[in-house]
Amino acid sequence: MKLPVIKHLARENEAQKLEHTIEVLESYSEHRSIKDEEMDVIGELISNLCGAVEVKHSIDGGTPEKDACNNFMQKVVGSIDR
């Protein structure tokens, strides 16, 4: 996950558009001809998009962008520590 990418995606796109993109990438990843290297890239893209959706929802709910990003990253780091 790359926070600058997540911030950019959250700023520049509506949540619905991000969610549709995730759906397309998930569908694409299910095709049998996808190679492991491609799957790694798709996984990184989906991770960043999911992060952007969460940050976008938080911002739309009234949380300042900086706080929304910090809260998201704390959540990610907290889940890794478990």
Image: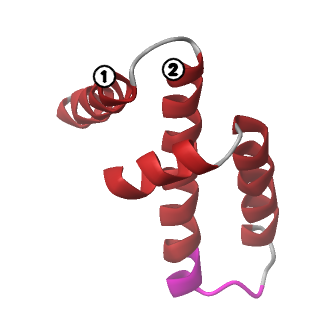
Span colored in magenta: 33-39
The residue shown at (43%, 15%) is 63
Q: Nearer the viewer, residue 53 or 8?
A: 8
Give how far apart the Cα atoms at labels 1 and 2 are.
Answer: 9 Å
Q: Amino acid at mark 1?
A: Asp
Residue that badge 1 annotates: 67
**Image color mode:** secondary structure
Residue 2 appears in the picture as rendered: no
Question: Observer-nearest residue: 12 or 30?
Answer: 12
Please tell me whether residue 7 is drawn above or below residue 32 in the rendered image. Answer: above
Q: Residue 23 at what x, y percent from top left?
A: 79, 52
> Which quadrant of the structure image shows residue 70?
top left
Q: Which mark is residue 58?
A: 2
- In this view, 64 is above or below 13: above
Q: Is residue 19 left or right of residue 68?
A: right
The image shows residue 38 at horizontal and vertical percentages of 58, 83
Q: Is residue 35 magenta?
A: yes
* Residue at the (29%, 30%) spot, across then down: 79
Q: Quadrant of residue 11 in the image?
A: top right
Query: Taking 58 as reference, is 51 above or below it?
Result: below
